Amino acid sequence: MPDTPMAVARCVLPVPGPPTSTTLCASSVKAVAASVLTSLRSTGETSKSKPAMSRCTGNRIWVMDRGIPTEESLAKMRAIGASYLVGTPKGRLTKLEQGFLEQPWARVREGVQVKRLATDEDVYVLAQSDARMDKERGMRRKRLRRYVDRLQALQSQALTRDQLLMKLGAAKHEAGRAARLVHLTIPKASIRTASLEFKLDRAKLRQVRRREGRTGGWEAHSRRSGLSDCKVFLT
């Protein structure tokens, strides 16, 4: 894990209610992960019996962004019965995508929907915002249209293969991730660019449309009542 500098906000959040105390300090990913483990070890050492440990962990919910807790710290939290709500890495969300497709959207407030996917260890929550979807979709359409117009312009130019590749590189850079939605057939020799062909990758476009508007994923674990104790942070 890279030791990335960051500003860390530490809050005490009663459920329900506003924060009772907040501290902002400079830290790093490694330092925060170590702090979590230190606190968990302290809880385990001072609470030898399960009832005592339950009293220490029962009223505390750990809330962390993705990249902060390690798998080791999450396993430790589950082992002592701690409750947590942490950001889910994007790679894990991709692996869970098929499972989320089978779940219905639930409206939590105006313009925001969530999906829940329960596993043996955690409950995963995927959030989607209508406003964010409209914004991302508009940006993607604008960049894709501009990229296609540029490709059509290159088709009408007489360029060597090397010249074409340089211009394509610039066009892809300007288009950003929208360029991945177009499949290119590039000539293998230094000939006129009339042989340049391209077509929309509709499978990738459908995948991108499904993911537009997602504000992120969260994984929740609660010994007492599943997601109910954590959903306050989503609404």
Image (cartoon, grey):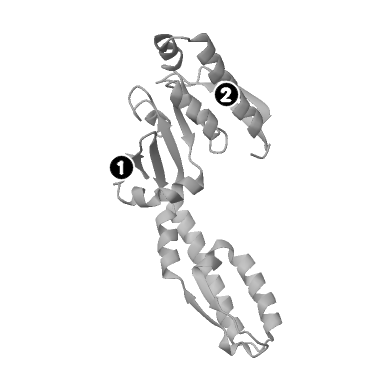
Q: Is 98 placed above or below 185 here?
A: above
At 66% from the left and 80% from the top, the residue drawn is: 164
User: Label 1 amino acid?
Assistant: Ala
Where disc 2 sits, the SS reads helix
Q: Which mark is residue 106?
A: 1
Q: Within the image, what quadrant is residue 4 found in? A: top right
Specify which label sits upstream in the sequence, 1 or 2.
Answer: 2
Q: Is 79 placed above or below 197 here?
A: above
At 43% from the left and 36% from the top, the residue drawn is: 219
The residue to which callout 2 is attached is: 37
Residue 23 is situated, as x and y percent measured from the top left of the image, at 61, 22
User: Label 2 amino acid?
Assistant: Leu
The quadrant in which the N terminus is found is top right
State the residue in front, 79 or 24. 79
Mark yes or no: residue 143 visible: no
State the residue in front, 195 or 30. 30
The quadrant in which the C terminus is found is top left
Residue 171 is situated, as x and y percent measured from the top left of the image, at 62, 71
Say which of marks 1 and 2 sits in front.
Answer: 2
Whether residues under marks 1 and 2 lie with C-beta atoms below 8 angstroms apart, the answer is no
Where disc 1 sits, the SS reads strand
Mark yes or no: residue 210 visible: yes
At 34% from the left and 28% from the top, the residue drawn is: 226
At 40% from the left and 63% from the top, the residue drawn is: 206
Residue 218 is situated, as x and y percent measured from the top left of the image, at 44, 38
- Circle 1 Cα neighbour tier, 10 Å, few/some/many (<14 / 14–19 / ≥20): few
Q: Disc 1 to disc 2, how far (Cα)? A: 34 Å
Residue 11 is situated, as x and y percent measured from the top left of the image, at 54, 22
